[in-house]
Image: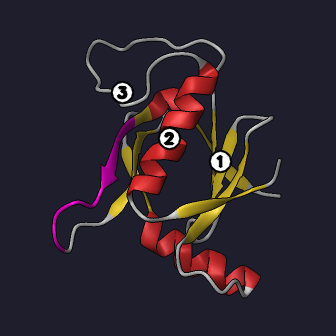
Amino acid sequence: MNFIIVRDTDIVAVNRGKKENESSGIIYRDNTGSLHEIDFHTCALNYKAEHNYASDYCIGERKSDEMYFLFYTSGIKTKVVFQKHYVVDPFCFHPLKGSKASRFHSLQELICETNFSTCDLS
C-alpha cells in the first residue's frame, strides 16, 4: 500500500471547524518546512467511495495497538504514525503532548470533536 507518512510530531494544528463554513482537518509540516492539510470532509468522501460505507463521517482507519491513523486523502493516503519520543520544537505549536499513547488518544478525541470518526482496525 502506498501512502505518505507523517510523524505525529510534525502536526502543527488540528482545526476542529467550530466556526460556520470552517473546514476540519490536520495541518502538518513536511521535512522541507512546507505546510499541508488533511481535510476531513475530503477524507470522508474518499472513504465512502472506496468502501461503499453508509456513514458520511468516517475519514479513515486507526490501529491503536500499532499507534497510527490512516486518512483517506485525495490521490495517496496519509498515515500519521506516533513517535516513541516527543521532541519539543520551541518555534512550533504542537496540540499533542505527553506519552505516545496519550498523544494518540488526544488526536482521536480531537477528531471526535469534529463529528468525524475513524474505523478501528485493532
Give the answer, above or below, for where 1 lies relative to 74: above
Tell me: residue 68, above or below residue 16: above
Residue under the image location 83 percent in, 47 percent down: 122
Upstream in the sequence, badge 3 or badge 2? 3
Instruction: Give, as a three-letter code, the residue at label 1.
Output: Phe
Which residue type carries mark 2? Leu
Q: Is residue 72 visible?
A: no
The answer to whether one can see residue 14 in this image is yes
**The quadrant where residue 2 appears:** bottom right
Per the image, label 2 sits on a secondary structure element best described as helix
Verify CB contact (< 8 Å) between mark 1 and mark 3.
no
- Say whether disc 1 or disc 3 marks the residue closer to the N-terminus: 1
Percent across and percent down for residue 56 are: 54, 81
- What residue sits right under mark 2 in the picture? 107
Question: Magenta region: which residues?
Answer: 12-20
Q: Are marks 3 and 2 in contact (CB under 8 Å)?
A: no
In screen coordinates, is 58 left or right of 93?
A: right
Q: Quadrant of the N terminus?
A: bottom right
x and y percentages locating residue 110 in the rendered image: 43, 46
Regarding mark 3 in the picture, which secondary structure is present there?
A: loop
Q: Are marks 1 and 2 in contact (CB under 8 Å)?
A: yes
Q: SS class of the residue under badge 1?
A: strand
Which residue is depicted at the point 39% across and 60% down? 114
For the image shown, how many numbered marks are present on the structure? 3
Q: CA distance from mark 1 to mark 2?
A: 9 Å
Q: Which residue lies at the image location 36% right of the left edge and 31% below the top edge? A: 95
Q: Which image quarter: residue 23?
A: bottom left
Residue position for label 3: 94
Magenta-drawn stretch contains 18? yes
**Residue picked out by circle 1:** 69
